Amino acid sequence: MFSKETYIRRRQELKKLVGDGVIILFGNNESPMNYSANAYAPMRQDSSFLYYFGQHRDGLVGVIDIDNDTEMLFGDDIDVEDIVWMGYTPSVADLAAEVGVAKTAPMKSLTSHLSPLTSKKIHFLPPYRFDTKIQIMDLLGIHPDKQKEAASLPLIKAVVKMRATKSAEEIAYLEAACDVGYVMHTTAQLLIKPGITERFVAGQVDGIARSLAQGNSFATIFSQHGEIMHGNPSDAKLEDGRLVLCDAGCELNDYCSDHTRTMPVNGKFTQRQKEIYSIVEACHDYVLEVAKPGVKYMDVHFAVCRLMTEHLKELGLMKGDTDEAVAAGAHAMFLPHGLGHMMGMDVHDMEGLGQIYVGFDEETRPNLEQFGTNCLRMGRKLEEGFVMTDEPGIYFIPALIDDWKASGHCKEFLNFDMLETYKDFGGIRIEDDILIMKDGCRFLGSKRIPYHPAELEDFMKTNI
C-alpha cells in the first residue's frame, strides 16, 4: 500500500479528469474454484479499485460523487463466524480511513444511495467478472451484454492517463518484481537438462513466484514448442538438442514482471539455433537504442521488423525489398505478434479497459486487416514513466508455413523451400521490461537474466 495521501491525490485527479457525474469502482469478490467455500486464493483485487482505494479485501465498492465532492466505501463488516475461520479483519470504516475516505455504508444500501443519483452521469469501467456484471444490472438496469458499450469512455481515458505513467514508488515496486523474475528464470536455467519434464521446471518457477511474491502475474508458459505463443507446460521430457522457451513473471506489491528466455536444453546452441537466436537478440537490444519519449512504439515495432527481415534475408529465409516485405506483412510469418505491451498492476496493463485506448491514439490505430499487425498491443507515442515489454521473437509455425505456401501469400518475400527445413525448429523469444526515461530507456531490475548466447551457455554449465 502507498500512503493515504497518495490515494487522496489520485481520486482528486480522477475527479478533475472525468469532470462530472458519479464514478463507481467495483472491487472483486472471491472466486469459487469448485464450490463457494473453496475459492481461488489469494483473491486478486481489481487493479483500478486498488489504484484509487488501495484495499485488497473482497466485497467492496467505491463511489465518488464528483458533483458533490464526496467519496464513500461500501462493504459489509465480517461477523464472529468469519473471524473464527479467517481471523480478524479491519472494519470497512477502518479500511476507508486508511485511504482517506470518510464515509462508509453496508453493501445493501448501495442501491438506495445510487437511486437519487441516476439522473447524473454514472461512470463505470468495463466489467470482466460475471458477478460484477450482475451487480451492475441490479444497480443500473443494464444487461451484461450491453455493459461493455455502456462503460464510461471519459472514465476509461482518465484511468488510462493516470495509470500509464508510473510514479517513482510504482517503479520501485516494478523493479522489485523484476528482481523476483530474475530468480524465477535463473532457477529454470539451472534446472533445465535432458530428461526432466516441462511441468517440473515450470512448477519450480511458479514456486519461486509464490515464495518470494504474491504469485504469478500470469500462467507460466514453458514449452519445447516455442512456436506456440502460449504453450502450457506438459509432462513431456526435455529433449537433447531442442530449445525450450520460458515466459513467466510474478506479482509483488500488486505490480508485475514479465520476462521470457529461450534456452538450449543441453546447454549448448547448435549453429542453426544460434543463427536465429542472434537475430532475436539483436532485435531485442536494438529497442534500447530507439525507444524514447516522443517516439511511437509502432515505429519501434516496425524498425525491429525491418532489422529482423534484413537478417533473415542474409540467411536466405526471406528475400526482396525489405520495406516492401514489411509493408506486405511478410515478416509476420516469423513475428506474428507485437513488440510489446504496457506493464504495471496488470501484466498487460489495463488491457481490460480496451486496448485501443491503452495502446493507441488517433495517429496509431492498428491495421486490423493485416495478419500480425492486428496483434499489436502498443503503438502510441512513448512518454517518460511508461513501462513496456520488449519481446521480439522468431517462430517457425508449421501450420502457418503450410497455409501461406498453399495460398502463395507473400511468396515474393519468403523462401518456402528453406522454411520447410525449419518446421522442427520451434521458436525463440527474448523479453524484458523497460522503463521510458527522459532521454531514452533502460531495462528494469537490478540483475539481468542471462540471455546473450555465450553468457547463457556459461551460466547453464553450473546446471544442478
Image (cartoon, helix red, strand yellow):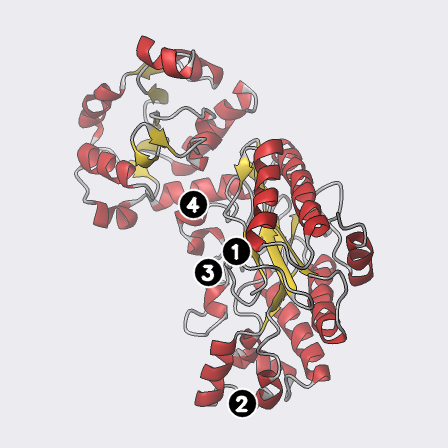
Q: Report if the CB atoms under discs 3 and 1 are less than 8 Å apart.
A: no
What amino acid is labelled 4 in the image?
Lys
Q: CA distance from mark 3 to mark 4?
A: 13 Å
Question: Can residue 413 be seen at all in this image of the molecule?
Answer: no
Residue labelled with disc 4 = 157
Q: Position of residue 112 (x, y in %)?
A: 18, 22
- The residue wearing badge 3 is 362
Tell me residue 169's x, y (percent): 63, 31
Quadrant housing residue 212: top right
- The mark closer to the camera, 3 or 1, is 1
Could you tell me how far apart the alpha carbons at marks 1 and 2 are, in whole angstroms?
A: 38 Å
Q: Residues within 10 Å of mark 3 (few under 14, many from 20)?
A: few
| Quarter of the N terminus within the rendering | top right
Image vertical order of residue 407 relative to residue 112, above or below: below
Mark 1 or mark 2: which comes first in sequence?
1
Q: Which residue, given by chain and number where applicable, does mark 2 sit on? A: 411
Residue 207 is left or right of residue 81, and the answer is right
Nearer to the camera, 378 or 427: 427
Which residue occupies the foreground of this view, 163 or 396?
396
Tag of residue 63:
none
Measure the alpha-carbon separation of dots 3 and 1: 46 Å
User: Label 2 near label 1: C-beta < 8 Å?
Assistant: no
Q: Earlier in the sequence, mark 4 or mark 2?
A: 4
For the residues labelled 3 and 2, say whether their Cβ atoms are less than 8 Å apart: no
Res 235 label = 1
Which class describes the residues within 10 Å of circle 4: few (<14), some (14-19), or many (20+)? some
Q: How many marks?
A: 4
Of residue 355 and residue 440, the one placed in the foreground of this image is: 355
